[in-house]
Image (cartoon, grey):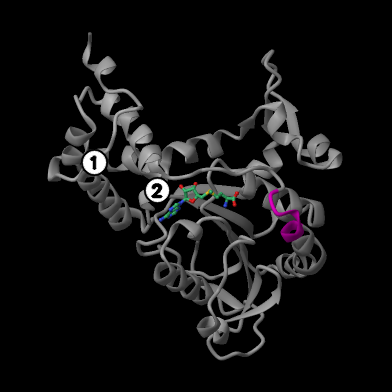
């Protein structure tokens, strides 16, 4: 029997090794692993244990937590993050954007000003493309204007799927027919996969970013969408992140969060709730801003 066959998904993860994994993942990505997820964690890290030709989960845990294991951190994060997403998830957010926000952003871009939208924790790209479809629907000329969408994730493997922009036919069934017709084209492969249209791709820059590291942006954002990402963080980490988002928004900029997430009452001085799971930045001075104070490049 070869080494690969020796580690099966059913192998247990000791409490001690679970602690090693949980501490490291928290340190690297801010993610909190619940002890009841131990079997799932074991199954996920078995894949990496086999891929590296190691003999046990315990050996993998010791390796990934050692200085030599640093090169494994990307793959470790990738197997342990939850990337579940879909097109048109929480569609009320996109309706809100189309009706209340994008018409103003269109005017702003048409005046020659800069417009920036950020999908933070974009997973395989569906959310970022949904933002592009909404933007192009309201402002078909935005690719010619200073109008950009940034989409970031900590998981480089999932980002390469996002960048590729190819989805199977089943994945787009949640989108309205007019969007499917306008923004997807068959790749020509017999399996029916579809590719996102160039106009939507061109609006988006995908990039690797750990939300717990420093952010390299000089300018501020008009809209930040960070949904179903902080549910994996502890409460203090979540609140720190909401505050950083508030500071990264232009005055009156919008923060969209997942419906199961919430901003604590202490932060309501920075973020004003304007609809379920939608917040508006009050800005540093609380003044009504026009986003003209932005500088630099994103
Ligand atoms: C469940 S998906 C949500 C995707 C999308 N926002 C949505 O709502 O459908 C969560 C994503 O957050 C990413 N993520 C987790 N921790 C992160 C961190 N510290 N920095 C950046 N992204 C992170 C994961 O890699 C994953 O792709």
Q: Which mark is residue 241?
A: none
Where disc 2 sits, the SS reads: helix
On the image, the x and y values in percent for residue 163 come to 54, 38
On the image, the x and y values in percent for residue 96 come to 77, 64
Q: Which mark is residue 36?
A: 2
State the residue in front, 38 or 158.
38
Magenta segment = 89-94
On the image, the x and y values in percent for residue 91 come to 75, 54
Residue 285 showing in the rendered view: yes
State the residue in front, 255 or 195.
255
On the image, the x and y values in percent for residue 89 come to 69, 49
Q: Is residue 273 left or right of residue 34?
A: right
217 shown above or below 253 = above
Number of disc labels: 2
Where disc 1 sits, the SS reads: loop
Magenta segment main secondary structure: helix
Magenta-span inclusion, residue 91: yes
Residue 79 showing in the rendered view: no
Q: Which mark is residue 14?
A: 1
Q: Quadrant of the N terminus?
A: top left
Quarter occupied by residue 294:
bottom right
């Amino acid at each position: 029997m070869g080494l690969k066959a020796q580690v099966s998904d059913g192998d247990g993860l000791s409490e001690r090794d679970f602690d090693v994994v949980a501490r490291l993942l928290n340190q690297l990505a801010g993610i909190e692993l619940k002890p009841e997820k131990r079997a799932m964690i074991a199954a996920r890290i078995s894949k990496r244990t086999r891929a590296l030709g190691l003999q046990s989960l315990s050996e993998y845990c010791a390796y990934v937590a050692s200085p030599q294991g640093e090169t494994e951190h990307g793959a470790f994060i990738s197997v342990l993050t939850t990337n579940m997403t879909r097109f048109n998830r929480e569609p009320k957010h996109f309706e809100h954007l189309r009706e209340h926000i994008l018409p103003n952003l269109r005017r702003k871009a048409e005046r020659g000003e800069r417009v920036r939208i950020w999908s933070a924790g974009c997973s395989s790209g569906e959310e970022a493309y949904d933002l592009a479809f909404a933007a192009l629907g309201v402002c078909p000329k935005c690719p010619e204007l200073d109008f950009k969408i940034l989409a970031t994730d900590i998981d480089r493997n999932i980002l390469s799927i996002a960048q590729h922009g190819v989805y199977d036919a089943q994945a787009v069934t949640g989108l309205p027919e007019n969007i499917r017709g306008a923004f997807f084209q068959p790749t020509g492969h017999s399996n029916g996969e579809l590719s996102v249209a160039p106009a939507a791709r061109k609006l988006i820059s995908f990039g690797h970013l750990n939300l717990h590291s420093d952010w390299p942006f000089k300018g501020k954002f008009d809209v930040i969408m960070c949904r179903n990402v902080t549910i994996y963080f502890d409460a203090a980490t979540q609140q720190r992140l909401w505050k950083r988002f508030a500071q990264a928004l232009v005055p009156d900029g919008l923060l969209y969060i997942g419906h199961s997430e919430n901003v604590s009452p202490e932060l309501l001085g920075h973020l004003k709730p304007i609809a379920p799971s939608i917040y508006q930045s009050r800005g540093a001075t609380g003044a009504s801003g026009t986003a003209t104070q932005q500088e630099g490049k994103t």
